[in-house]
Image (cartoon, rainbow, N blue to C red):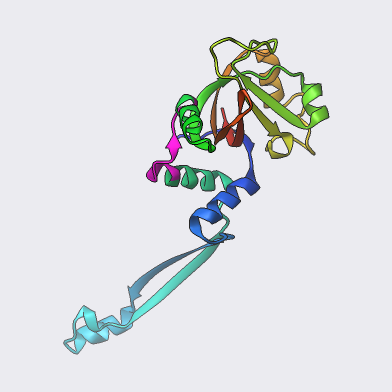
Amino acid sequence: MKLERFMYLNVAGAASLYSQLRGEDVVETLYSMEHSKASGLKFALSAFLGGGAESSAISKESNSKKTSLRAENMIREIVASLGAHGTLHHSIRAALTATDSTSAPAWFDAKHPFSMPFSIDECNRERTVVFHSGYTRHGISIDGEPHIRMPASLNHFPSAYEGQLRISGHEAMLFRSLNGSEHLFSVFGSIFRAGDSYQVNPYAIRY
């Protein structure tokens, strides 16, 4: 399995989607591991009396453990479920076509180039990172390109501390190195029309 780094993960949103798909809240999962073994003494007595192995006494040992279902695994199951039902798009452009056709939000799980033109100080002040697509690095819209905004609350960044990006953190370093240029992010979320442009409601952003 390819491991991914989650820049953004809406844990509460993922749990809500998962409970809707399953019809119940999943708090923890119980795993039971059981195996059996023949008692050596009784097996020997059975053999002496002419019995077979089937008549030997069986003792069972069982171990159980409880595990919590993490949001990362919920996301994978949600994506698989939407894909199985034919309601998941594998490119943002396909999702745009769907939402234009139905006037309803469209689900997608796809890689797409987004820019993040704001400074770390601005993001921390607003407690939000806003990604853009269809704009230049200076925020000017590009003719012929769909204009997309993707606001992402810093409260859902696993590496953020109290809604703030650490100056020396991986995400802050990435944004500074890009300096407003596009980067290919992998996003699971829904997209909908907002006036003349579009907006993404992300549930997971991976890179």
As drawn, is 4 to the left or to the right of 8? left
Q: Is residue 41 visible?
A: yes
As drawn, is 1 to the left or to the right of 174? left
Residue 165 vs residue 136, the one in the foreground:
136
- Residue, x 73% and y 39% (percent of image)? 155
- Residue, x 62% and y 23% (percent of image)? 196
Residue 104 vs residue 204, the one in the foreground:
104
Q: Quadrant of the C terminus?
A: top right
As for residue 84 lying within the magenta part, the answer is yes
Q: Position of residue 128 (x, y in %)?
A: 74, 31
Q: How many labels does the image show?
A: 0
Specify the quadrant of the image occupied by residue 148: top right
Q: Is residue 97 above or below residue 158?
A: above
Residue 184 vs residue 141, the one in the foreground:
141
Looking at the rendering, the stretch of residues picked out in magenta corresponds to 82-92
As for residue 85 lying within the magenta part, the answer is yes
Q: Position of residue 21 (x, y in %)?
A: 49, 54
In the displayed orientation, state which residue is furthest to the bottom: 49
As drawn, is 7 to the left or to the right of 127? left
Specify the quadrant of the image occupied by residue 40: bottom left
